[in-house]
Amino acid sequence: MALQPASGAQDLLPRDVGANRWICEQLAAVYNRWGYAEVMPPSLERLDTLEAGGAIESSQVLQVVADEPLGLRPEMTASIARAACTRLAAMPRPLRLHYRGSTFKAQRIEDQGIRIAEDLQSGVELMGAPGLAGDSELLRLLLDAARGLPFSADQSPTLLIGHQGLLELLLSGAPEAQQPALRHVLCALDRVSLKAMDLEPGLAQRYLAVMDLRGEPHNVLAQLEQMLGSTSSLLHEISQLVNAIQRQAVEQGIRLQLDPTFHPDFELYDGLMVKLVCQGDHAPIAIASGGRYDRLVQRFTPGDDQATGVGFSFAVEGLRQLLQSRSALPGSDGEAVQLVAFSRSEQLQVALDRLQEIHRQGQRAELWPDPCTSQMDAEQIAVMRGGKLVWLS
């Protein structure tokens, strides 16, 4: 019999479960204040839903043996978009939904087979709020949710901002046949491959400069204006978006960084893309990510070119580990448990009655099932279990 969980899976111990619950409840309270209602999509979905029209590679989906092609969700957005466009199609827009649940991503490692990456996510999806208004609400909500989390200044929380349209605008100056390869090397920051491409010298220098172009948003936008011209409506929209969140980010100590080459793991997004990153003990940790996915929603609503969606999710496991490393999370055990103990076996019924009396008062208590030889022994057991003794002599 195997004594270890599957590769990539993990056992969550009581302290971890309590911390995860605290994080999820803090986040859900913020979502509720903003008018988001909770939903719970299924863990199992049809593969064509999970692959989100090719945005997610089939190799990233853990497939399940069944009579039809099924898999475990590697992320939540596609499932919620499906539900929003089918069972919730009659509900008025904007439609605001939030969720919590586990995701399962397949990681194929050479010579090791498939490794399961299981994560707990908490996030929101906003359907029917196009353009700047929807993007601004999403980022304000993301910052508001982060406000209640006990980050420290040396963790340097940074909100990375990208936009698919911005990358497309930068690529438009290159020959069309070279744009797919150029997109790949820019997002990978692959200078060697870029220099090896058969680009005009001026273009090669321009895209080398783009690889270094990230930082304070308005400074980056000013440099992009010099490259692209000041008439770009997209640059103006991104400037407005930054203005909508800048004061709140400064108040919370969250740095904003605009990065034209930023690209997430999944190909879901066709507009705004964001990632909230903190410095961990050894490396940066991404604790939240999201963006706009209008084309995904439109796949579930054929003929409706006005359907829109935007959302984000917190990676709860990564967030817990980040905060636990600094002992920044409140005690997950809550109040100390009371230990009801007794000295004679015939007192069991009385002990159970006392236990439930404590429960009816809204307090935590547990029973020690065997008679104790003395009150001192019972005290030692209570201390060992991190509680206080209720002794029946």
Image: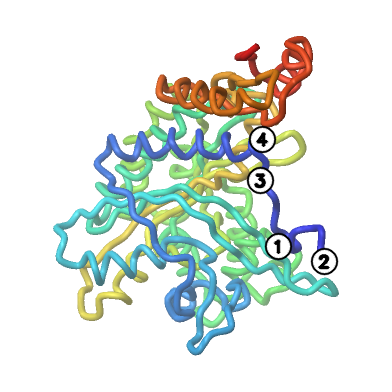
Say whether disc 3 or disc 1 marks the residue closer to the N-terminus. Answer: 3
**For the residues bearing labels 3 and 1, Cβ distance under 8 angstroms:** no
User: Does residue 27 appear in this view?
Assistant: yes
**Can you say whether 198 is above or below 118 in the image?**
below
Give amino acid for label 4: Gln
Q: Which mark is first along the chain, 1 or 2?
A: 2
Amino acid carrying label 3: it is Leu
Q: In the image, what residue type sits under mark 1?
A: Asp
Crowding around mark 2 (Cα neighbors within 10 Å: few <14, some 14 to 19, many 20+) is: few
Report the residue at 62% width, 14% height from top: 392
- Foreground mark, 2 or 1, reads 2
Mark closer to the chain start, 3 or 4: 3
Question: Distance from label 3 to label 2 (Cα)?
Answer: 20 Å
| Residue placed under numbered mark 3 in the picture | 12
| Depth check, front residue: 49 or 250 | 49
Task: Tell whether 98 sits left or right of 217.
Answer: left
Dot 4: element: strand
Give the residue pinned by disc 1: 190
